[in-house]
Amino acid sequence: MAETTNGSALSSEPPSALPKGFRSAEQGWPELHRIPHPPRRLPLLGDVLGASRTKPLQDSVRHARRLGPIFRRKAFNKEFVFVWGGALSADLADETRFAKHVGLGIANLRPVVGDALFTAYNHEPNWQLAHDVLAPGFSREAMEGYHGMMLDVAGRLTDHWDRAAMAGRTVDVPGDMTKLTLETIARTGFGHDFGSFERSRPHPFVTAMVGTLAHAQRLNTVPAAFLLRASARRNEADIAYLNRTVDDLVRERRRGSGGTGDLLDRMLQTAHPETGERLSPENVRRQVITFLVAGHETTSGALSFALYYLARHPDVAARARAEVDRVWGDAELPAYDQVAKLRYVRRVLDESLRLWPTAPAFAREAREDTVLAGEHPMRRGAWALVLTPMLHRDPEVWGADAERFDPDRFDPKAVRSRPPHTFKPFGTGARACIGRQFALHEATLILGLLLRRYALRPDPDYRLRVTERLTLMPDGLRLGVDRRTEAISDDLRAAAAPS
């Protein structure tokens, strides 16, 4: 989901004092030659041999395995430094020396949402205003208010899956999770219903959103933007559609009697508690688009990966299902507090996010001249991209079996034994995800509901493919779903007991 703001020392500096625009690595790393890069680098073109335009993140993961915990890649005179080693990443998490860097991929989204929470530069004032106004919308009290609406949307999903189960059809997991999470953030945040489950095709908002994310990623893979003229025209149309949709939503709210204290109400009615300043209409539009896009895209991916692993590991699914039955008991629907008691289900979700963090990288920049982990000098403004899927696979942190799916890695004792800053699916520091608790509650609730209601059948011929559109999502994942009729046995109930 969207990121929070960074109350850093950088934000007090005048914008003119900050390095601006894209800064290739040679501008900020005095000893760049010590950092390895892929072989067969070409003059002018860089490390393009064998590169994939559609899967640049997975390309970087492949290079990371060969080149080690810090490496660099160059494409068309743009040089990037990647970091994934646990010690290096932990050093970059030091908020006194490093801040969020709006990297190239995120900067490419600024034509869509400008200086919204996720895309704002550290010196821009609107994100601090928006954060302070919106943060109460993610308090415990607010979350309890969202719980009932989450259950309502989940009911539309289970109705859809019940019909598939009766007809013997498989379900489109990523597609259905996208419908679910879009409707959830639209209902809870903005009182709007896109009618996703009543449509045979994705809602045009989703199509436009995917188009803007894909265009932002394409811009990273070409030497000059003019090479993407056709894509740019489609992107302009997609942005115009997103703007019209949100403008209509806001106009409808202004004409009515108001919502129920949701995020949109806060954007329109709440003044900053200290300055009395309110969000401008343009800022409101940008924040709404940010929450609608980021608030459903990453969560739908997280749920899809978790369901993939649950279907592939029936022993894990049985243990998680037994926990749901034990904790929720005979209640037809769980209360808000019962969701947090699904500790093993949460471990399943965390382990899925470890292997496939749906927001797969975040960038950090040096506040002042410094030395990364006592080894690599960095000038002020120099930045590095933390490659989260590799950080989450660092064998020095996670062991030699880091590729293996094992939810017990998130047993409390195992978590305490690991160094800090080694699990970062929501980013790091003051600008980590503002909606983290919203996403975790939603995802844990949905997994619990689906495990309780269905047995999941994988396609034995399916091999996990991951599609990239700045975020990650399983590609082509379909599962069979059967309504549960069997009782949970005593031994499974015992297996689900708290450890």
Image (spheres, rainbow, N blue to C red):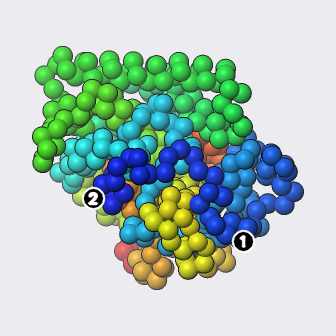
Query: Depth-wise, is mark 2 or mark 1 nearer the camera?
Result: 1
Is 290 located above or below residue 18 in the figure? Answer: above
Residue 453 is tagged as: none
The residue located at (58%, 36%) in the rendering is 216
Name the kind of residue labelled 2 in the image.
Answer: Gln
Pointer 2 residue:
338
The residue located at (17%, 38%) in the rendering is 277
The quarter of the image holding the C terminus is: bottom left
Between 165 and 222, the one lying in front of the other is 222
Q: Position of residue 290 (x, y in %)?
A: 40, 37
Between 348 and 215, the one lying in front of the other is 215
Q: Position of residue 458 (x, y in %)?
A: 64, 49
Q: Secondary structure at mark 1?
A: helix
Quadrant of the rendered image containing residue 41: bottom right
The residue located at (17%, 51%) in the rendering is 141
Q: Mark 2 and 1 residues: CB-CB less than 8 Å, in contact?
A: no
Is 472 located above or below residue 180 in the figure? Answer: below
The residue located at (53%, 18%) in the rendering is 237
Q: Position of residue 323 (x, y in %)?
A: 39, 64
Q: Secondary structure at mark 2?
A: helix
Left or right of residue 267: residue 416: right
Is 376 located above or below residue 310 in the figure? Answer: below
Between 370 and 146, the one lying in front of the other is 370
Between 379 and 277, the one lying in front of the other is 379
Q: Residues within 10 Å of mark 2 (few under 14, many from 20)?
A: few
Left or right of residue 324: residue 396: right
Pointer 1 residue:
34
Name the kind of residue labelled 1 in the image.
Answer: Arg
- The mark nearer the N terminus, 2 or 1, is 1
Left or right of residue 114: residue 463: right
